Image (tube, grey):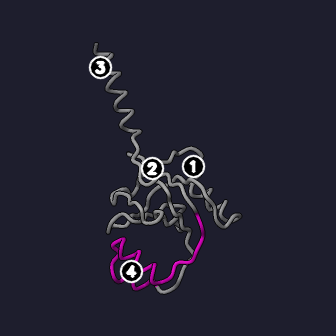
Amino acid sequence: MKTVLFSLVLGLFAYATQAQQYFGEKITDDSAISTTELMDELAEEGSMQTKVKGEVTDVCQVKGCWMTLNVDENQEIMVRFKDYGFFVPKDITGQTVVVAGQAVIDTVSVEDQRHLAEDAGMPEEEINKITEPKPQLFFVADGVIVEDE
């Protein structure tokens, strides 16, 4: 009896640790590439429909309407959600996600960078240091999977 109960508890724990939350369209994590693989492929393609798996580095603290994914210590992917149709939890920084949608490299204006910095809760002095447009990898997600820790 103890063995059966122990196995049941272990099974429930394993299920709980593999739980996922879905936002937007329900997607799968099949064929998801890493953020660095995406950068390599975009260098050749310029724009592509794909799935990407990565670590969340920041989330809009106003309503969860955007997030960033880590590529390396100097680069992030800005993820927005298709047609502003869904949001993600504001407390998922550090968690792993899978996003499915369209990736493209574009330029971010000073005004947009400052708006995003405000949404992220950056101090005014840091926001004022933003003075030039910058190239940015954007991802417009149709769906997101947040992997629970």
Left or right, 134 with reference to 147: right
Q: How far is the residue under mark 4 from the one under mark 3? A: 55 Å
Relative image position of residue 138 (x, y in whole percent): 54, 67
Name the residue carrying label 4: 126
Relative image position of residue 43 (x, y in whole percent): 68, 65
Assess disc 1: are there few (<14), some (14-19) or many (≥20) residues with their C-alpha within 10 Å of its C-alpha. Answer: some
Q: Quadrant of the C terminus?
A: top left
Q: Which amino acid type is marked by label 3?
A: Leu
Q: Please identify, in this view, whether the residue under mark 3 or under mark 2 is nearer the observer.
A: 2
Q: Point out the tag, 2 or 4, that comes first from the N-terminus.
A: 4
Q: How far is the residue under mark 1 from the one under mark 2? A: 11 Å
Query: What's the magenta region?
Result: 103-130
Q: How far is the residue under mark 3 from the one under mark 2? A: 31 Å
Q: Quadrant of the N terminus?
A: top left
Disc ID at residue 32: 1
Assess disc 3: are there few (<14), some (14-19) or many (≥20) residues with their C-alpha within 10 Å of its C-alpha. Answer: few
Name the residue carrying label 3: 5
Q: Which amino acid type is marked by label 4?
A: Glu
Q: Relative to 144, is 76 above or below?
A: below
Residue 27 painted magenta: no
Q: Please identify, in this view, whether the residue under mark 1 or under mark 4 is nearer the observer.
A: 1
**In front: 63, or 69?**
63
